[in-house]
Structure formats: structure tokens, C-alpha cells
Image (cartoon, rainbow, N blue to C red):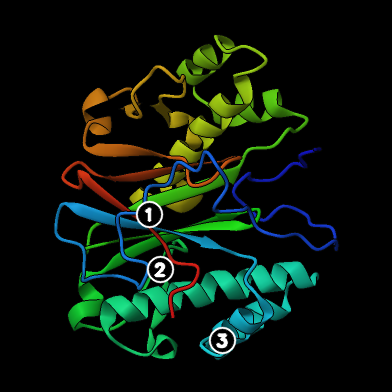
Amino acid sequence: MHIQARHFGEPEPRNPQSRTGPDLQRPGDSWPLDLPASGPDGTPDSNTVDVWRVSLAPSSERLEHLSAVLAPDEWIRVDRYRFVRDRQAFIAARGLLRVLLGRYLDCDPAAVGLHNDQNGKPGLTGDGDAAQISFNVSHSGGLGLIAVAQGTPIGIDLEEVREMSGLDSIAQRFFSAREMKDLALTTDSTCLDAFFRCWTRKEAYLKARGDGLAFPLDRFDVSLLPDQEPRIWAVDGDPSAGQAWRVHHLDPAPGYLGALVTPLQLSRLRRGDGSTIE
């Protein structure tokens, strides 16, 4: 796959062929379900973050249901997508986000107030319960992840692991010197996973910080080798700044890698599948 000159977290060019999402019931699925299939069982406590895996290739009936909860400004965004597949993926991702947040807030999904801050990070509008909930979203290929916590900054990132050209040049542009040294220790069979481990951890950290692209990716170091604990080694050369954050490695489905970055006190992770929640 040829990677064009772009920020890797931006939407990649698509072709018009239809694509189904990953089979979430395949053998080897490493996503143990801690949350009920019926939906959230209450707001996460102060040391817990909920992570919901969602399919972005729902049935036509399900897609119609999710379409009904979108706001007018979200339909404007839908219309910007050229291909039907991408429109449907956005509807599924945004609709399922609204359904899940509606369950946490005990309100109609269509009534959930969403906004982006000055750096583009999404959040909830309003007071009361809405002010006590933070969330973050990422999607790649046919899969999405939605993280929900109790009013604390969190960041999540997901990538479909795939072959690509120009991997070295992307790493040289965005990775730190320490990360490049670690990447050089990998073999042909482990390099791709190491690259995506590094990328998702860096993206998730930036999203947790809320800086957007204002904070350069090469100013902090993350672990990427399989025998290393998921962590942020240092920020601007300061190890203590990295120790303020917890990095969770995520294996949401075969062929995908993800990362969740939270403040240190969020030590408990609960996983759920939100694809069919009404």
C-alpha cells in the first residue's frame, strides 16, 4: 500500500469497492467482554475506563436506525464523503457513539450534545452528568473503538495492521531517536506490528493531552517492542512526565492494534462490544 504525504491519523484515500468489517467472532479474538451486551451498567468509577468495540459495517436495518439519531451538522459531514462505504462507516461510528453516550446519560441518543474544542477534541455539551463524562473515539478499516471515563482526559487510537510502502520515511519523520533505535532491532516479521504499536501509542497520548498536532510526535518516546511494557518513556527528555500516564495495549480483533492512554489513576479497563446495543 502506498502512503501519500499526509498525517497518518487522517482519513486515507478510499476506493469505491464495498468492504465488510472484521469478523468479531473469529477464533483467536483477544477481546474479553467485561461489559454487558445490553449496554453500559452505569458511569465508570473514578479508576475505570470503559472501551467499546464497534463494527462499522452494520446491517442495512441497523444503519437506518443509527441514521435516525444523527444531528444536522453530522449529516453535512456525511455528505462530504465521496464513497458510500465511507458515508456508512461515519454514520455507524457517530450513531453508535450517540447510542452509547445516551445510555450513560440516560437520554435519547439524538439529544446527546456533542462539540469539538479548539484543538478538535470531541466532548459533551451541558452540565450535570454530561460534565462528568469524557470520551474518545478512533476507527480504522471496518472497526471502531469508543473509550468512556469519568471526567478525566483519555485518548484512544486504532489502526488496521497492513503492509505499506514508505514505512521507513514515515517513522523517520515522526518517531523519536529512541523509537528509531528500537524499531531497528525488529525483524522483517515483527517490524510492522512494532510500527503500529508505536504509532497508536503516540496518537493516543496526543489525544489524551488534547493538543492535537500542536505537540510534535518526536518530542516524546513510547515503547514499541513486544517484550516491553506499554509505556511512555519520557516527554521532552523528562521521564517523570511520562510516568504521569498509563498506556494500555489493545488487541480488539485479529489484524488490528490499538492503544489507550489515561492518567495513572485509571488502572481498571473494562471491555465491551457495542455493535448491537439499542
Say which amino acid is labelled 3. His
- The residue under label 3 is 65
**For residue 103, which quarter of the picture?**
bottom left
Say which amino acid is labelled 2. Asp
Q: How crowded is mark 1: few (under 14 residues within 10 Å), some or many (20 or more)?
A: many
Q: Is mark 2 on a helix, strand or loop?
A: loop
Disc on res. 117: 2
Position of 143 with respect to 152 (left or right) is: right
**For residue 63, which quarter of the picture?**
bottom right
Instruction: Name the residue at 35% across, 81% down.
Output: 102
Q: Residue furthest right?
A: 16
Q: Residue furthest front?
A: 27
Q: Is mark 1 on a helix, strand or loop?
A: loop
Which numbered disc flags the more N-terminal residue, 2 or 1?
2
Q: Residues within 10 Å of mark 3 (few under 14, many from 20)?
A: some
Disc on res. 210: 1
Marks 2 & 1, CB-CB < 8 Å contact: yes
Say which amino acid is labelled 1. Gly
- Estimate the x, y position of residue 20 in percent, counting from the top left: 71, 60
